[in-house]
Amino acid sequence: MIELFKFDDYKQIVTHLLEVNKVKGARSKLSRAISCHLAYISQVLEGHSHFTMEQGQLLCQHFNFTDQEMEFFLNLLGYARAGTPALRKYYEKKVLKYKEEQNNISSKVQASQLLTQDQESQFYQSWINVAVFVLTSIPNYNQIPLIAENLKISERKVLESVGVLEQMGLVIRKGPLITSTGQRLHVASDSSIISKHHSNWRIKAIQSLDSESVKEDLHFSTVYSLSVADVDKIRDIILKCISTTETVIRPSKEEVMHCLCIDWFKV
């Protein structure tokens, strides 16, 4: 399915879908699905007429939209059909809200547990807590001596971190084994600890430049000059990359720990 949320007009979405699905009789099938004459499809897409809200819902079902995609599409349709400035403003706010949510990285990452504000501050204050939490999900690294050796820190620091994670319900200790409870965490962009979390792992990225595994690691830094319009295009590409990465990582077997840092900002 195309990314509906990048469009500003419901007609653009329908036109794009009809062009992408280059199946003979695509418009005829759509006209039957939404109970209208074939000529009316062209009249709407190429003129000033609009589908009814009922036709919009049938159209969404025809193209197998998700509930979220359907709601976004119907809001665009409602905006186009609105007969008063107040009603147009109402639909405009709903459309903008959906776009903002889609541009939020949190919507691309599926977290299974939310920490309290105090827990979040304590957890993300040090990179060690995050690293220990991740390593406890890997069978070959779920003991204190092994974690300490892998992270090149003292066993005392690992023990302190494990105590913090236990209190949060993120790990379980059974003898020498420390097992992750399998929760997925994500710190929101508006969190008070977000800057600390980002800086912790970017420092680790810099340190990795001098590590022995530098040949296996991937680092890329550059600065571009580009048009204002293309800034958003690059941002969309990066967000799509994050979503794709998530689909690979979720079913992946826990064997090694890697860090991914991505930055795209105005200088």
Image: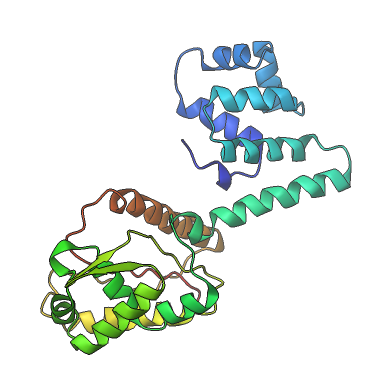
| 32 lies above or below 94 | above
Task: Using the rendered image of the protein, determine whether residue 37 is visible from the camera's viewpoint.
Answer: yes
Q: Nearer the viewer, residue 255 or 205?
A: 255
Q: Position of residue 240 (x, y in %)?
A: 42, 52
- In the image, what residue occupies the spot 23% across and 89% down? 156
Question: Residue 76 vs residue 99: left or right?
Answer: right
Q: Position of residue 250 (x, y in %)?
A: 32, 51
- In the image, what residue occupies the spot 34% across and 48% down? 247
Task: Using the rendered image of the protein, determine whether residue 258 is visible from the camera's viewpoint.
Answer: no
| 145 lies above or below 106 | below
Q: Nearer the viewer, residue 31 or 197?
A: 197
Q: Position of residue 127 (x, y in %)?
A: 33, 80
Q: Position of residue 190 (x, y in %)?
A: 56, 72
| 215 lies above or below 127 | above
Q: Nearer the viewer, residue 162 or 244?
A: 162
Extreme residue toward the front, this view: 175
Count of marks overlaid on the render: 0
- In the image, what residue occupies the spot 37% across and 54% down? 241
- In the image, what residue occupies the spot 27% across and 74% down? 132
Question: Residue 62 vs residue 220: left or right?
Answer: right
Dividing the picture into quarters, in which one does residue 42 lie? top right
